Amino acid sequence: MNDWTQCVTTPAVSTDGFASFAMPVYRASTIVFPDAEAYATRQQRGDEGYTYGLAGTPTTRALERRITALHGGARTLLVPSGQAAITLAMLTFLAAGDRVLIADTAYPPVRDFAGRDLAKLGIEAVFYDPTSLAEVERLLDERTRLVWVESPGSTTMEVQDLPAIAAAAHRAGALVGCDNTWASPLNFKPLTHGADIAVEALTKFFSGHSDVLMGSITLADAEHARAVRATLGRYGIGVSPDDCSLVLRGMETMPVRLAHASRVAADIVERFAADPAVAQVLYPPRPDSPGHALWRRDFTGASSVFSVVFQPQAVPHVAGALDTLETFAIGASWGGTRSLMAPMPVRRFRTARPWAGDDLVLRVSIGLEDPADLAADIDRFLNHLGAGLDTTSRATGTI
Ligand SMILES: *Cc1c(COP(=O)(O)O)cnc(C)c1O
């Protein structure tokens, strides 16, 4: 072999005796075939066959299978973000003239997608009160092809009765998709509670280190999985095997990270709940949180994300209190090693179930720092709010 050819030829290296726990990163755009016949018949390689890098390499398959096993599904497809998982699931199953019912508490960019892109395609998106089965039943009609669930809901944490919603949707001939990012399949398995499609933002707890974006779509039915795979092929959507290896690594510690962070979260939640500046803590594992009964019935555990609603007089002091934080960072997303707080507006994202509280809800995500450092930060935060309230009360003569 001449030098130039030698330079571009991958040597055949023995893997005999190389037994490792790690899944190698298999990269590829081109897949090569042993002969002309194999190339000509490549589309017959089956659902998980290798034909071109876009549809995955062995690294991609390893991650898909791990997620499929956790969900008890037929097949999982990977996409570049959690938001892409939602939109591509919808685009696969919806067509012009269809209606889709979307929980009012769905991840806000889903509302934007529905209003702009689904509308442009002639698909009618109707938002429903996530706590009202009667409303879902009333809105289901013969055009309804999909009911979208997110439980607990973004920011305001309403828990949905997925088994009842799925039964109603299936009676009406509609599919059910569920964004399961808060719980992860460790704490809730949508497919075993009636959903046809389970979506995860792997960006969060799965990857676990705030350094990769990915989403997964797990289907209960192999034919539906084929339909999603075909959509991804047509749109040219795939994920990097390097990113898959990061998520594969993150997943190995996910159960321990999630269990630890949810234990710490339970303590931090009580610190907030006991403070006079706090009106309500929205965290389904808490007995006085809305949706607690459904959470206890259907979920096997909790994650470490919750929301805090403040007394109206405390709201103007929240921004200053955020600036006193030393361990918590201010930022969106969650599920990483670092604890985060993010003030979220809610009202503009609710149409079917108007938000009656103040338009500032603080979303808190607990990470893996020393719990004592986190507790000290919460004390600083609440002290700042308390001092602000005292000043306000004196100025207005209410004390
Ligand atoms: C973060 C999040 C998403 C989107 O995930 P990305 O990977 O950031 O696009 C979707 N749904 C829920 C509930 C989320 O929290």
Image (tube, rainbow, N blue to C red):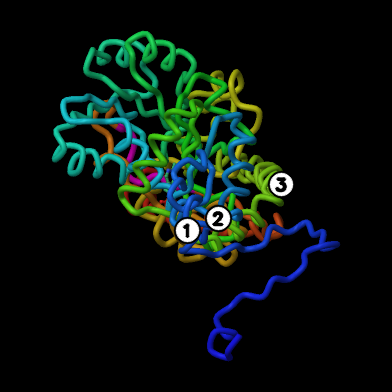
Say whether disc 2 or disc 3 marks the residue closer to the N-terminus. 2
On screen, residue 221 versus residue 378, left or right, reads left
Mark 3, other Cα within 10 Å: few <14 / some 14–19 / many ≥20: some
Circles 1 and 2: CB atoms closer than 8 Å = yes
Mark 1, other Cα within 10 Å: few <14 / some 14–19 / many ≥20: some
**Residue at (52, 61) in percent of width and height:** 32
| Residue 236 pos. (x, y %) | 34, 54
State the mark number for residue 177: none
Image quarter hosting the C terminus = top left
| Residue 296 pos. (x, y %) | 61, 22
Can residue 385 be seen here? The reply is no
Q: Secondary structure at mark 2?
A: loop
Can residue 98 be seen here? The reply is yes
Camera-side mark, 2 or 3: 2
Q: CA distance from mark 2 to mark 3?
A: 33 Å
State the mark number for residue 260: 3
Residue receiving disc 2 = 57
**Residue at (67, 48) in percent of width and height:** 254
Q: Quadrant of residue 20?
A: bottom right
Q: Is residue 97 part of the magenta span, yes or no?
A: no
| Residue 336 pos. (x, y %) | 58, 56
**Residue at (59, 64) in percent of width and height:** 327
Q: Quadrant of residue 164?
A: top left
Give the residue type that dot 1 points to: Gly
Near-viewer residue (258 or 383)? 258
Q: Majority secondary structure of the magenta segment?
A: loop
On screen, residue 372 versus residue 209, left or right, reads right
Near-viewer residue (151 or 21)? 21
